[in-house]
Amino acid sequence: MKTMTCQDLGGPCDLAHSGESADEIIKAQDQHLKERVNAGDDAHAPARDDMKGRWRHPMKSMSWYNGVRKRFAALPER
Ligand SMILES: [Zn+2]
């Protein structure tokens, strides 16, 4: 299990996501961004838009994914 924060993934807060893979953490962040924006939290709106853009343009976003995967791989197990 490893942990990355909302901030590590381009968001504005330091909420921590735990997961067994980078994909799991990206999914948790996606869910978190949706929830915050739906709750009226404008601070999370730009990060939410970035994430939406990544789903729409997966090829363009490969470097972002690879960066997250690399950072995830470098983290210590908890
Ligand atoms: Zn957040």
Image: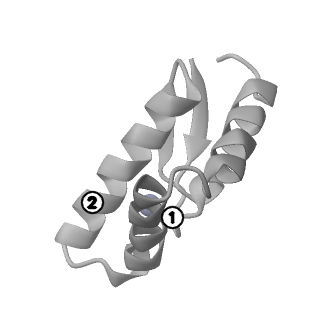
- In this picture, residue 4 sits left or right of residue 26: right
What amino acid is labelled 2 in the image? Lys
Query: Could you say whether the residue bearing mark 1 is in a helix, strand or loop?
Result: loop
Quarter of the image holding residue 2?
top right
Query: Could you say whether the residue bearing mark 2 is in a helix, strand or loop?
Result: helix
- Image point (18%, 69%), residue name: 38
Position in image of residue 27 (x %, y %): 39, 39
Label pair 1/2, CB-CB below 8 angstroms? no
Position in image of residue 21 (x %, y %): 55, 22
Q: Residue furthest bottom?
A: 42
Question: Which-is-in-front pick, marks 1 and 2?
Answer: 2
Q: Which residue is mark 2?
A: 34
Answer above or below: position of 32 versus 24. Answer: below
Q: Is residue 24 visible?
A: yes
What amino acid is labelled 1 in the image? Cys
Position in image of residue 30 (x %, y %): 37, 50
Q: Mark 2 or mark 1, which is nearer the start of the sequence?
A: 1
Answer above or below: position of 5 versus 2. Answer: below
Asked whether mark 1 and ligand 1 are closer than 8 Å, the reply comes as yes
Quarter of the image holding residue 77?
top right
Position in image of residue 60 (x %, y %): 62, 58
Give the number of the disc on residue 13. Answer: 1
Q: Is residue 18 visible?
A: no
- Image point (76%, 28%), residue name: 75
